Image (cartoon, rainbow, N blue to C red):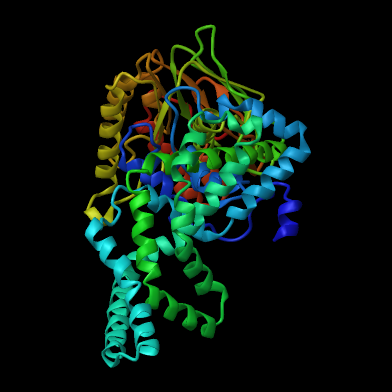
Amino acid sequence: MKRKANNYTGEIKPGDFNLTDISAYFLHTKKKGGDNLLSGQTYSDLGVEELFTFADRTTSGIGQQYLYHTLRTIPLTKGEIGKNEDVINHLKTDANFRGRLAKALFRLRDTEVYSIVRLMADEHPVASGKTTIAFTILKFLPALFLLLYLFAHITACGMLFLVAIILNAVIHYAFKPKSLDYIHSVPQLIKLLGIAEELCKYPELGKLTKEIPDALATLRPIRKTALFLRMESKLQSDMAVFVWFCTELAHIFFLTEPLSFLQSVSILRNKNREIETVYRFVGLADCLLSVYYLREELPYYCLPEKADNGYRLEGEEIYHPLIEDCVSNSVIIKEKSVLLNGSNMSGKTTFIRIIGINVLLAQTLHTAFARTFALSAPIKIYSALMLADDLSEGKSFYMKEVDTIKEMISRSQEGTANLFLFDEIFKGTNTTERIAVAKAVLSYLNTTDNIIVASTHDAELATLLDTEYDLYHFSEVIQDETFSFDYKLKSGPLYQRNAIRLLEINGFPPTVIRDAYRTIEKISYPPTSTQPL
């Protein structure tokens, strides 16, 4: 492991990710509330889980949890990564500093480090002062009775010695379940405190938060009182059964483990803010290192800027980092939002995701997958791209759409800037009503505060919204008996219809093809040529 720490170059981590533990800090902050957290629906729609595993170049478990939290928390002002670009630049130019930071953080690589988040909870066991005094007395009684029996030859003391041992054993094992979480988390917290003290000595890192010296001073006593919890953690993993047995007897004899536990939780109580301050300091340092390594691997990237000239969003050659040889596109959103049409597999949904992840990472990791990228203001993200039936709640696809879009409408009334992403809006209902309600919703959401990027197969919807939205399309290229996609964004609506032609290329019966062409002539609105290209 030491060799790996010394040679760490920010490679993608192999194997499975334990997202249950990795998401613990995000879930902790979620309990506090806040409407700037990325929802589960948008998280799934944009593929943030896959994006996280690609972007995660952290060295410690703390950094990994903090990176996940950062990706799912859209800052209301300039984010922490953007505020500390000077640290990333220093990491880029100073390989020695980069190596020392990675080596220090690597000591927090154990999976048990994830449990530190539990110590930020408000609920710690409470013990009265009388209990602590009683335990302090009880820890001396076995030794006292044993000495009196051996040297004063008081027979009754032998019996009292046995009673004292049995009583201490009962107390020891009664407290064992209560201390289990602390046996793992407190030793990791102590390790975190030591590494934080080491890191804050670097001038480049010491300025990440002004509160770190006071937080470390407040938590320093825990490093002494938790001695026996640290021993227990070590013994459970490393020592032989015999040594563990002897140590367990010593713990029972002197009642050291319950007393250490009570002293530790007493110090930790009401120290949530200080623990979180130290946690965020180390997590942010690791995130900055991770962002540096991520950027080094990208074909190109840019730092987001503030849009001007009346633009609300501007991206030049934006792309998706997880798509091999991804075709880039450029987009400018000024007064109007964007409505896309085109056939399946032509690139509409991928383009919508590309906009979403660039808006997300521009704000969270201060990194855009583009030549240039600019936003006019901080913007929250909501999406309805991959909706499905909710069997657990007995909801149909359409009702899931209704609930999701209703939430978007509610968010649009909060007076903040929002990015709303739709793929085939209201596709869970019939054509006539789909066009009607889609037009109504897209018109309602289309305000100066909101940016909407939506796709549709309905040419009628594009016609109804052509004065409110900028229309774009993706199209396939049909040549002879083959078709292909260029995945390039094109201005204007798509007028050609190739769906039936694609059936013909794929060998559908001529009778079916002729019937389809005759039928489309009858129902086409507005009238459109349907002859094969």
User: Relative to 508, does residue 465 appear above or below in the rendering?
Assistant: above
* Residue 397 percent across, percent down from the top left: 29, 47
Q: Position of residue 380 (x, y in %)?
A: 40, 28
Residue 344 locus on image (x, y percent): 50, 41
Q: Residue at x 54, y 34 (%)?
A: 354
The residue depicted at 31 percent of the width and 30 percent of the height is 408
Q: Which residue is found at the position 58% from the left and 53% from the top?
A: 108
Asked if residue 458 lies left or right of residue 59, the reply is left
Quadrant into which the N terminus falls: bottom right
In the rendered image, the vertical position of residue 250 relative to residue 433, given as above or below? below
Q: Left or right: where does residue 57 sit relative to residue 416?
A: right
Q: In terms of depth relative to the viewer, which is nearer, 123 or 260?
A: 260
Regarding residue 19, the answer to whether it shows in the image is no
Q: Quadrant of residue 413?
A: top left
Nearer-the-camera pick, 259 or 405: 259
Question: Where residue 69 sits in the image (x, y, percent)?
Answer: 46, 41
The C terminus, quarter of image = top right
User: Foreground: 488 or 72?
Assistant: 72
For residue 441, what is the image quadrant?
top left
